[in-house]
Image (tube, rainbow, N blue to C red):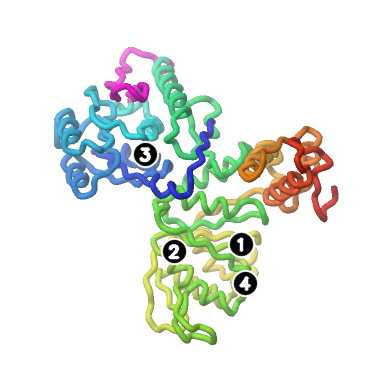
Amino acid sequence: MLTVPLQVPASNVRMRIRTALIASADTSFRQRLSEALTGLRWQVREAEGGADAWTQAQAAVPEAMIVDSWLPDLELAEFVRDFTENFPHVDLIAAGGAQECHGLRGPYRQELLYALRRCQDSDTAAWNAAPELSSPAAEPKCLPAVNTAGHSNSKVVQHVQAADDALLAEVKSSDSVPLIAIRSNKPEANNRDRVPELIGNSRCMLEVSRRIRLVAPRLTPVLIEGPTGSGKEIVAEALHRLSPRNRKPLVAINCAAIPEALLEAELFGHTRGAFTGAVQGRVGRIEAADGGTLFLDEIGELPLALQSKLLRFVECGELQRVGDNERVKVDVRILAATHRPLAQLAQSGTFRSDLYYRLAVFLIRTPSLIEHKQDMSALVEHFLEKLGKESPIKRIDQTALAKLGMHDWPGNVRELEHVLERAAILAGDEPVLRADDIDFGNSVN
């Protein structure tokens, strides 16, 4: 598993939202490719044939077009020729076709080829081809399908593996690839689904990433459970980033940080004069997330009275502002997080069981740091690089690393980050953190 980090300025992130149009009569092909591209932060549209694709492209020109090796209504070579003439600024890839794909080679071509490789299925004729990888200056080609007749399965696998290795090498050197986990067909491909925000290759962390990848493209409500400081908010951000709603806002609210008297107005909004001090109306957090994702952090701290009102919204998608008689329709995807055993609270009656089952359609559990201590070195390196953005980057010696490994980490990954920041300050101008610089604060050293 190879991770390709890329520092993208915040002002440029919005520009990386791209649209791809997939033209294929094969529903399975469209679905697999759509999922792969969505994971790479593409907006995807689908067409069942050439005429439908042409109509969609005229209505809204995509940045890229991927056309299958066969179209049910048009001759492929003719379609490719006419499309490139009429849409010269669209990056066109004809998967498995023998013809040249003349025209624009877009800056994100390698992402498209990578998505195609992820959809590779050697048992399907349309996916027996491996896209040819040329140098950036070369004319892009789409190879004809590989004829597997008379070849053993091992030879086919070797061909696919060689193409994947070549693709992986070019993707690694490409500056157009976002911060993603790249996978190949090598044995260590168990790490293929790792989300880049989650540092570490331990089994429990890879399971978190796998679950994120599975549920992110859906509208399914997700409940994130885990101890304080274990990265629940990072999981929520990854779920939003990998979802089709990533162009809309991710709105978070900490249900434990706002007084109960104000929490209802904060969630649902209020009208002018709804209560003392309400000099003007205000849109609530739920409404502010319309079209995007609502993240309810520490949902276990939500008062019972508000739980019933939230349940009504979850069931019907309508909310009522404080002091208003009208209902407002809002479309949000709900993520919730808690460090408390919400299922037990639901059984005991301190949390509404009907709301729990609405929120916990899909569960993701973030492990404590003690459960994946084998990731300590990777986490330390990550946090030191993060600190190095504001000051000269520091290294850590083995004695300091051993001292970190002996700690129980009640504050989990967040505590580790703070301990390293404290150590960097205590080290002063020294480039290396030593055991004497590791201070656990009020914890036992």
Q: Residues in magenta?
A: 128-154
Q: First in sequence: mark 1 or mark 2?
A: 2
Q: Dot 3: what SS? A: helix
The amino acid type, in three-letter code, at marker 1 is Ala
Q: Is residue 372 left or right of residue 315?
A: right
Q: Are marks 1 and 2 in contact (CB under 8 Å)?
A: no
Q: Which residue is mark 2?
A: 289
The amino acid type, in three-letter code, at marker 3 is Arg
Q: Is residue 362 left or right of residue 422?
A: left
**Label for residue 349?**
4
Give the main secondary structure of the magenta stretch. loop
Q: Are marks 2 and 3 in contact (CB under 8 Å)?
A: no
The amino acid type, in three-letter code, at marker 4 is Gly
Q: Is residue 193 left or right of residue 245?
A: right
Q: CA distance from mark 1 to mark 2?
A: 27 Å
**Label for residue 32?**
3
Q: Nearer the viewer, mark 2 or mark 4?
A: 2
Q: Dot 4: what SS? A: loop
Looking at the image, can residue 217 be seen?
no
The answer to whether residue 58 is above or below residue 309 is above
Q: First in sequence: mark 3 or mark 1?
A: 3
Task: Give the class, few, some or many, for how many residues have Cα within 10 Å of label 1's Cα (few <14, many ≥20).
Answer: some
Q: Are marks 2 and 4 in contact (CB under 8 Å)?
A: no
Looking at the image, can residue 31 be seen?
yes
Q: Dot 2: what SS? A: loop
Q: Which residue is mark 1?
A: 343
The answer to whether residue 287 is above or below residue 205 is below
